[in-house]
Structure formats: C-alpha cells, structure tokens
Image (spheres, rainbow, N blue to C red):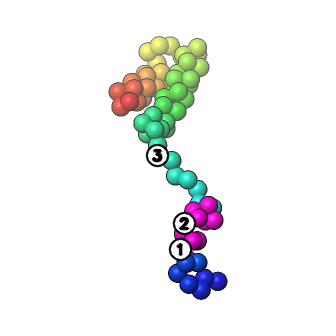
Amino acid sequence: SLNNRSDLSSLFKNEKSFNLPIQKKPTPGQRYETQFSNLEKLEAQYAELSANFKPNSETLSDLKYKIDNLKSQL
C-alpha cells in the first residue's frame, strides 16, 4: 500500500512497473497494408483464373475492375 506522496511519486517514475505495452507510431506504409494485401490477393486470383477463362469473360473483367480501382486508391 502507498502511504505517502514519495511512495506514489517513486511508483510513477518507474514506468516499467506498469508493464504497459509500448505504443509505436505507425509508419506511413502501414496505413495502406490492408489495401496492398487485398490487391495481392486479387492479382493472384486473376492470374489463377486467367488460365481457365477467356480474357473478356465477366469474371476476369470484374476482377480487373477491382484491381484497377484498388490501384487508383493507392
């Protein structure tokens, strides 16, 4: 138990005693990690499906639209 101000003061000076996680500032690239991940998935899916579908198929056209849209956002 803390009985006086000096005990309380010494407790707050020792930040390690709280075992709080250190919050790091995000790097500029982390802001777009989700979009880049989605783009990679869509491009992989496009590459995989392009072996089975014609280039002008609706499926590939939709994927291409999504890929282009994500690229323009990034």
Viewer-closest of 28 and 20: 20
Residue 11 against residue 16 in the figure, above or below:
below
Judge from the rendering whether residue 4 lies leftward or rightward of residue 64; answer left or right. right
Which span is picked out in magenta?
A: 8-18
Q: Position of residue 70 (x, y in %)?
A: 40, 30
Q: Secondary structure at mark 1?
A: helix
**The residue tagged with tag 2: helix, strand or loop?**
helix
Q: Amino acid at mark 2?
A: Lys
On the question of residue 38 being in view, the answer is no
Q: Residues within 10 Å of mark 3 (few under 14, many from 20)?
A: few
Q: CA separation, marks 2 and 1? A: 6 Å
Residue corresponding to mark 1 = 9
Q: Is 21 drawn above or below residue 67 in the view shown? A: below
Q: Earlier in the sequence, mark 3 or mark 2?
A: 2
Q: Which residue is mark 3?
A: 25
The residue tagged with tag 3: helix, strand or loop? loop
Number of other residues with Cα within 10 Å of mark 2, as a class: few under 14, some 14 to 19, many 20 or more: few
For image coordinates 47% across by 13% down, the residue present is 55
50 relative position to 27: left or right = right
Residue tagged 2? 13
- For this orientation, the residue located farthest to the bottom is 3
Closest to the camera, between mark 3 and mark 1, is 1
Q: Residue furthest toward the front?
A: 6
